[in-house]
Image (cartoon, helix red, strand yellow):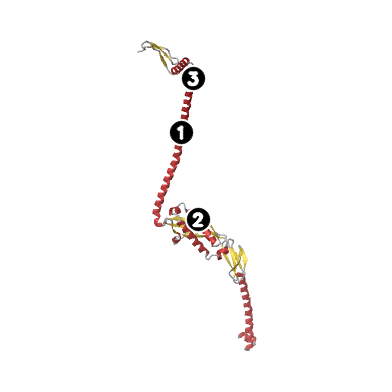
Amino acid sequence: MNEWNQASGGSPPTFEEVAAKIRQQFNAFKGRSVLIIAALAVVVVFWTAWFTVQPEETGIVQRFGKVVRTAGPGLHFKLPFGIETARMLPTARVLKEEFGFRTVASTPGEKTRYDPSGAYKDESLMLTGDLNVIDVQWIIQYRIEDPIRFLFHVRETPKTIRDITEAVMRRAVGNRIGSEVLTTGRVDVASEAKIEIQKILTEYESGVRLVTIELQDVTPPDTVKPAFNEVNESRQDKERTINRAEEQANREIPKARGVAEQSISEAEGYALERVNRAQGEATRFESILKQYLGAPQVTRRRLYLEAMTGLLADMKGLYIVDQDQQAMVPWVSMESGAQPSVQRRQ
């Protein structure tokens, strides 16, 4: 009112003057409001008209819910005010699902920490083909190969992957005996499960490609671990004994075969030698007989002289006696350098 009084020289303002003043202030406020609303509209349009796709992601742009395009890494624009929306999927990242355990923290350079509560035994306890219960903990790694199928062909795709994996793994374990799964059959179980799971996911058109399935820890339940360890030790002793016996057999059997082959070879050689010698003696006898039939006296004397030559060659001394063996005879030594001597026959 003071302003009005000063402006009008101290007289009170009229109704028209007050109305004009209010209209002027309203117009000024209206102009500022329009500017503010326009600025807010520009901010909203700018904020809702662009989106960023990270290097390991793929963006799926939907217009009123319908997929219109996909976007690679970088800055992209879309229609504002919710006309188009963008959803990001980590298509370049290897995703992981854990069964029977959960990772609490995994920091490079530090030891991985797991949830110690043991609240996931329902996932890992399985019944084997020989009606034994074992605790199987495993992980599954996969990539999103088709983001559109991943989002829209299967409802709750991560949960579907977990359900399929658990069902297939239980069947693979149930088709084997417990000792096989605990020892030598782990790789076969993982390979079989991977093939079966990928086949089901492909039939469902889930857009997922498996990378690997790894059995992390396969153990009997805690309540039967002591008994299982004793059985396992017995089996290991059995295997060691069998391996030791096979090692000894592999060492002794070739040795025995070598000895047998040597004996056979020696026997064959001896037999061949005897046969050849017999054949030679027979041939020699036939030759002597032929000569004897031609000249009996000469052949008989020659044979006698040859026999005596061979006999006397091995003797060291020679005794010469008379017919009655009573006379004193000289003894001629057959050794080289020996002097002849005379002995009386007693």
Q: Secondary structure at mark 2?
A: helix
Q: Which residue is mark 2?
A: 192
Q: Which residue is mark 3?
A: 290
Q: Amino acid at mark 2?
A: Glu
Q: Amino acid at mark 1?
A: Ile
* Residues at marks 2 and 1 touching, judged by CB atoms closer than 8 Å: no
- Residue at 61% x, 85% y is 2
Q: Position of residue 222 (x, y in %)?
A: 41, 57
* Residues at marks 1 and 3 touching, judged by CB atoms closer than 8 Å: no
Q: Position of residue 244 (x, y in %)?
A: 43, 43
The residue closer to the viewer here, 200 or 20, is 200
Which quadrant of the structure image shows residue 250? top left
Q: Secondary structure at mark 1?
A: helix
Tell us which disc is closer to us: 1 or 3: 3
Q: Is residue 19 above or below residue 206?
A: below
Q: Residues within 10 Å of mark 2 (few under 14, many from 20)?
A: some
Q: Secondary structure at mark 3?
A: helix
Tell us which disc is closer to us: 2 or 1: 1
Q: Amino acid at mark 3?
A: Lys
Q: Position of residue 240 (x, y in %)?
A: 42, 46
* Residues at marks 2 and 3 touching, judged by CB atoms closer than 8 Å: no
Q: Position of residue 189 (x, y in %)?
A: 48, 55
Q: Which residue is mark 1?
A: 264
